Amino acid sequence: MAKQKDDKTKNKTNAMRILDARKIPYTTFTYRCDAFVDAVQIADMLGLPHEEVYKTLVTQGSSRNYYVFVIPIAEELDMKKAAKSVGEKSVSMLHVKDINEVTGYIRGGCTAIGMKKQYVTRIDQSAQQLRTLIVSGGKLGIQLRLTPQDLAAASGAEFADIVVRSTL
C-alpha cells in the first residue's frame, strides 16, 4: 500500500507537498517544457487569462537580504515601492545564475512556496481582487491555481503595492 502512496506523491513538487500538508486546495496545470519559457507564453499555451497569472521575482536588498515579489505577468516590479515595502533603501534583481542557490528552484520554476529559506515575501495588492490566481508550481511545466489568501498563507506573504502603475 505504501508504494501506491509513493506513486501519487513522487511527481509532486515541494510547493505541492507544502500545500497538501496545510490542506490548502489547488489545481494543477501541466505543460511540456524543456527550457525556460516566460510566463506570458505559458499563460498563452494553457489558455489562461493574463490578469490571473503571476510571476515570482527574487531580489536582494542593500542589506544583502533576499526578498520575494509575486506580481502579474504583464507588469513590472517597481523597485522603489518594492524596497519600501520590505524596509530597504533599494533592491535589485537576483542574477539568474544565483536563483537555484538562493531559492532551491530554477528560473521559470520559482515559486514563493517552499524556498530553501523563508524570505520576506510580498504579493502585489491587485491579487486581492481575484478569486484565484495562478503561479509556478515549483518546477518547469507545472502551474498552480489557488486563492491569493492561500498563497499568502503558504508563503508567509503580505500584500503590497509593488508594481509600476500607469499614470494615464
Image (cartoon, rainbow, N blue to C red):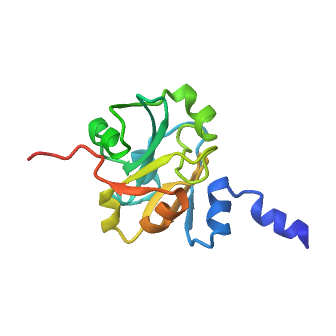
Whether 51 is drawn above or below 102: the answer is below
Q: Where is residue 145 in the image (x, y as percent from the top left)?
A: 49, 64
Q: Where is residue 59 in the image (x, y as percent from the top left)?
A: 44, 35
| Count of numbered circles in the view | 0
Determine if residue 70 is in view: yes
Residue found at x 57% / y 72% = 25
Seen from this angle, which residue lies furthest left?
A: 168
Residue found at x 62% / y 56% = 15
Determine if residue 76 is in view: no
Picture quarter containing residue 63? top left
Residue found at x 42% / y 59% = 47
| In this rendering, position of residue 131 left or right of residue 141 | left
- Of 34 and 143, nearer the camera is 143
| In this rendering, position of residue 117 left or right of residue 1 | left
- Of 59 and 99, nearer the camera is 59
- Of 7 and 91, nearer the camera is 91
Q: Position of residue 56 (x, y in %)?
A: 46, 46
- Of 133 and 112, nearer the camera is 112
Q: Where is residue 6 in the image (x, y as percent from the top left)?
A: 83, 63
Residue found at x 49% / y 37% = 66
